Image (spheres, rainbow, N blue to C red):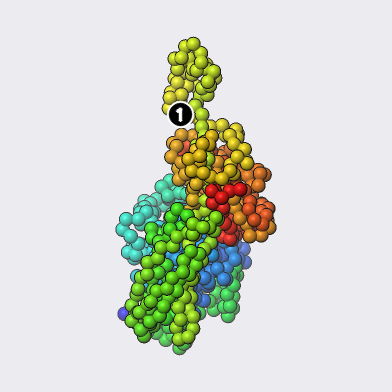
C-alpha cells in the first residue's frame, strides 16, 4: 500500500484548490470568447477572487461527503444542488428540470439534454473525487461517475473519469505524460474523448506553438458552444503539456486559447497545483491567504482556501484507511440517504414518458442496505396507477418490480409533470420514494404544405401546348434554362411569408380521417426538442402548423427560449410573439422572448415551422427568467381531440 504523510497530502490538496481558485479567477472574465487572444498577465487578474461553479459545486459535494460518506448516491448530489444552488446555465438547467419532474440520475443527464450533453460542467468537478482517493485512480474515476451522470452522459462523463484518475495518481506521480496514460486507463477504448487526448498529445509532441495546436484541435473537435467539452479539454492538455508546470504560464496559455476560459484555466491550474504542492506555488507566486467566493449556499467554517483544503484532507485521510500517516483524529457519523431500502427507477429504453397512445414501462429497483431481513408492502400510487407489492428481502439483496403506467384515457389534458410515490412502513415509520413520468405533450399538426418550384399554375397547364418545357419557360426564375428545368423535376418550395391557414382554423378539434384541406395528425412531443421529420416524412421544403392548447395554473408573466434551425413563426392567443426567416445552427436558446403573458386556464400556442433544408430542429421552453433560469414544469396540454 502506498503511503503519504498527512503534511505532504494536505500540501497537495491545498495546492490543487489554490490552483483551481486563483487560475480559475484568471480565466473567468473572458469566458465565451471563441478566438485566440494575446492578453498579457497582470497581477490584478488573480488578486480579486470571484465565484466560479468549478469550485462552487465541489464545495457542495464536500457537504454531501461529510454527511453520507462515500455511500452517497447521485440523487444526494442532485438534491443538494437543487436546494443550495440557484443558477441554471446549460446542462444545470436541464438536470434541475428533470429533478422537478422526478427524473433522477443517470437519466437526468441524458433526457432532454441533446445540446449540452457534452458540456464542461462535468470534468470541472473532478478534483474533489481525486483528493479523497489519493493513490486510487480506479476508485476516483468510479466515484466521479456518480457526479458526472447528474447532467451529462457518455463522453463528458469519460472526461471527468479521466481527470479524477489523473489527479488521484498525481499524489504519487508528477510526469504529465504518465499521468495522462493513467487517466486513459479508466475511459473506454473506443470513444471520441480518448482520441481527442491521443491527438492532442501527438500534436504537442510535434509542435511548439500552443496556438498552432489549438488550430488542430478546433479543426477536428471544435464546437459552437463555448462550453463544449472536446475543444476545452484539448486546450487544457495543450496548456499543461507545453508550459513545464509553470502555474501562471499554464493559465495564460489556456486563457489565450479562448472558449470556456474559467474552466480551462481552473482545471489546468488545479493539476499544476496538485503536482507541485501549495508550498512551492505560494513561494513562487506569492499567493498569501487566498479566499474563495461562493455562488451557492454552504455552511463552511470560513472562506479560506486553506481551511477548505484542510477539511477535504481530513475527510480524505479518514477514508484512506491508514494510507495517510500522521493525520489528525477526526470522527464522522455518516447517515445513509435511504434506509433500510434504497429505491430507484429504471425506465425502459431510457424513456420516462407516457401519453394517451403509449404507456411508460419502468422497473423499481429495491435494494436492502440494512443488516436485517425486510418484509413489507410497497404501495405505488399516482395518476392512473394504484397498486401494492409484497417485498421480502434478506440483507444486501435486491428485487426488481416491473411497472407499466398508462395515461388515463379519460384525461382530456396531458401534464408535463406527473409524480408517483412508492411508500412502505419500517418500524412504524412511513418511508417514501418519489419518482416521475413525463407527459408527452400533444400538438395538432397540420401539413405538409408546399408548391411546385418554379411555380406552375393551372392557367399555364391549360395552354394549347402541354409540353413541360413551355411550362417552365413561362416563368421567371434565377439561373439558366437547365437550372429551371431540373428544379422543376427535382425540387419544390414554400413561401416563407405566406400564411396558408388562419389562427382559428388551426384550433378546430382533431378528427381522424376528417375531410380537411391539409393532412392533420396528433404529435406527442416526448423531449424538449424535436425535428420536422419526427412529425412528417415529407422530404422536400414544406410548412407545418403545430397547434397546442396550453393550460396555465395561474395568470403568469414568464419567458420563452426557442431553439430553431429553420424559419418559424410563433403566436400566443392570436398575437404574434416571434418570427425568424433566417436561422443559425440549432441550440436550445436561439431566441429569447421577454415578458410573455399567459392567462389562467387555456392558452392557444401556434407554431409555424418551415422546412427549407435537411436540418429542421425546434424547441420551446417556458421559464422564470429570460436565460439560465429554472423552467416551468406545471403546464398541461389539451389533447387535440378536445380542442374548443
- The percent coordinates of residue 438 (x first, y second) are 49, 59
Q: Position of residue 330 (x, y in %)?
A: 47, 87
Residue 179: which quarter of the image? bottom left
Q: Nearer the viewer, residue 65 or 634?
A: 634
In the rendered image, which quarter is residue 395 located in?
Answer: bottom left
Q: How many marks?
A: 1
Give the residue drawn at x 48%, y 78%.
431
Q: Which residue is more in the foreground, 618 or 293?
A: 618
Residue located at (48% from left, 40% from top): 513
The residue under label 1 is: 491
Residue 290 vertical placement versus 474 (above, below): below
In what element is the residue under mark 1?
loop
Density class for disc 1 (Cα within 10 Å; few <14, some 14-19, many ≥20) is some
- Quadrant location of the N terminus? bottom left
State the image coordinates of residue 606 (x, y, percent, origin top left).
59, 45
Q: Position of residue 174 (x, y in %)?
A: 38, 68
Taking the image as drawn, is residue 53 in sight?
yes
In this rendered view, identify the residue nearer to me: 337 or 275: 337
Q: Residue at x 45, y 45 (%)?
A: 534
Residue at 33% over, 60% down: 188
Please, which residue is most extreme toward the top here?
A: 464
State whether residue 205 appears in this view.
Answer: no
Would residue 529 be found to the left or right of residue 576 on screen?
left
Amino acid at each position: 500500500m502506498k503511503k503519504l504523510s498527512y503534511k505532504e497530502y494536505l500540501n497537495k490538496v491545498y495546492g490543487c484548490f489554490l490552483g483551481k481558485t486563483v487560475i480559475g479567477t484568471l480565466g473567468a472574465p473572458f469566458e465565451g470568447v471563441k478566438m485566440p487572444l494575446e492578453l498579457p498577465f497582470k497581477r490584478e487578474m488573480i488578486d480579486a477572487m470571484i465565484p466560479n461553479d468549478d469550485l462552487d459545486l465541489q464545495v457542495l459535494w464536500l457537504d454531501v461527503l461529510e454527511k453520507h460518506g462515500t455511500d452517497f448516491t447521485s440523487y444526494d448530489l442532485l438534491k443538494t444542488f437543487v436546494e443550495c444552488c440557484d443558477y441554471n446555465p446549460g446542462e444545470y438547467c436541464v438536470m434541475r428540470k428533470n429533478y422537478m419532474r422526478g427524473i433522477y440520475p443517470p437519466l437526468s443527464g441524458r433526457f432532454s439534454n441533446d445540446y449540452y450533453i457534452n458540456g464542461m460542467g462535468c470534468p470541472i468537478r473532478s478534483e474533489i473525487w481525486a483528493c479523497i482517493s489519493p493513490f486510487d485512480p480506479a476508485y476516483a474515476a468510479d466515484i466521479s461517475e456518480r457526479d458526472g451522470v447528474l447532467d451529462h452522459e457518455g463522453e463528458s462523463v469519460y472526461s471527468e473519469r479521466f481527470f479524477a484518475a489523473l489527479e488521484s495518481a498525481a499524489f504519487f506521480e508528477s510526469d504529465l505524460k504518465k499521468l495522462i496514460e493513467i487517466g486513459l486507463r479508466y475511459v473506454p477504448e473506443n470513444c471520441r474523448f480518448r482520441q481527442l487526448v491521443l491527438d492532442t498529445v501527438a500534436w504537442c509532441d510535434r509542435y511548439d506553438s500552443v496556438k498552432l495546436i489549438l488550430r488542430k484541435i478546433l479543426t477536428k473537435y471544435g464546437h459552437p458552444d463555448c462550453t463544449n467539452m472536446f475543444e476545452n479539454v484539448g486546450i487544457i492538455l495543450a496548456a499543461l503539456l507545453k508550459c513545464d508546470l509553470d502555474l501562471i504560464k499554464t493559465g495564460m496559455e489556456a486563457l489565450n486559447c479562448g472558449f470556456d476560459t474559467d474552466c480551462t484555466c481552473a482545471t489546468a491550474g488545479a493539476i499544476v497545483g496538485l503536482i507541485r504542492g501549495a508550498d512551492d506555488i505560494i513561494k513562487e507566486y506569492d499567493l498569501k491567504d487566498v479566499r474563495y467566493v461562493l455562488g451557492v449556499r454552504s455552511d463552511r467554517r470560513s472562506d479560506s482556501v486553506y481551511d477548505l483544503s484542510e477539511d477535504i484532507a481530513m475527510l480524505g485521510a479518514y477514508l484512506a484507511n491508514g494510507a495517510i500517516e500522521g493525520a489528525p483524529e477526526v470522527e464522522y457519523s455518516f447517515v445513509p440517504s435511504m434506509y433500510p431500502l434504497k429505491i430507484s427507477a429504471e425506465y425502459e429504453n431510457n424513456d420516462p414518458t407516457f401519453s394517451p397512445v403509449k404507456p411508460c414501462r419502468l422497473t423499481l429497483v429495491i435494494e436492502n442496505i440494512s443488516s436485517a431481513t425486510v418484509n413489507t408492502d410497497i404501495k405505488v400510487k399516482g395518476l392512473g396507477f394504484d397498486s401494492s407489492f409484497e417485498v421480502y428481502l434478506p440483507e444486501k439483496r435486491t428485487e426488481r418490480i416491473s411497472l407499466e403506467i398508462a395515461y388515463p384515457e379519460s384525461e382530456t389534458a396531458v401534464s408535463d409533470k406527473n409524480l408517483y410515490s412508492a411508500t412502505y412502513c419500517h418500524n412504524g415509520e412511513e418511508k417514501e420514494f418519489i419518482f416521475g413520468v413525463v407527459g408527452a405533450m400533444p400538438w395538432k399538426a397540420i401539413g405538409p404544405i408546399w408548391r411546385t418550384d418554379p411555380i406552375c399554375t393551372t392557367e399555364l397547364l391549360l395552354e394549347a401546348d402541354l409540353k413541360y418545357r413551355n411550362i417552365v419557360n413561362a416563368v421567371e426564375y434565377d439561373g439558366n434554362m437547365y437550372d429551371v428545368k431540373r428544379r422543376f423535376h427535382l425540387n419544390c418550395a414554400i413561401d416563407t411569408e405566406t400564411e396558408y391557414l388562419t389562427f382559428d382554423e388551426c384550433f378546430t378539434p382533431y378528427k381522424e380521417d376528417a375531410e380537411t384541406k391539409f393532412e392533420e395528425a396528433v404529435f406527442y412531443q416526448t423531449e424538449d426538442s424535436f425535428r420536422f421529420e419526427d412529425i412528417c416524412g415529407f422530404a422536400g421544403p414544406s410548412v407545418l402548423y403545430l397547434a397546442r392548447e396550453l393550460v396555465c395554473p395561474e395568470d403568469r408573466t414568464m419567458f420563452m427560449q426557442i431553439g430553431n434551425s429553420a424559419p418559424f413563426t410563433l403566436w400566443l392567443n392570436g398575437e404574434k410573439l416571434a418570427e425568424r426567416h433566417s436561422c443559425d445552427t440549432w441550440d436550445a436558446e436561439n431566441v429569447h422572448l421577454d415578458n410573455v403573458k399567459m392567462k389562467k386556464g387555456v392558452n392557444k400556442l401556434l407554431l409555424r415551422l418551415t422546412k427549407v433544408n435537411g436540418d429542421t430542429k425546434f424547441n420551446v421552453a417556458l421559464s422564470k427568467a429570460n436565460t439560465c433560469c429554472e423552467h416551468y414544469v406545471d403546464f398541461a396540454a389539451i389533447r387535440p381531440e378536445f380542442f374548443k
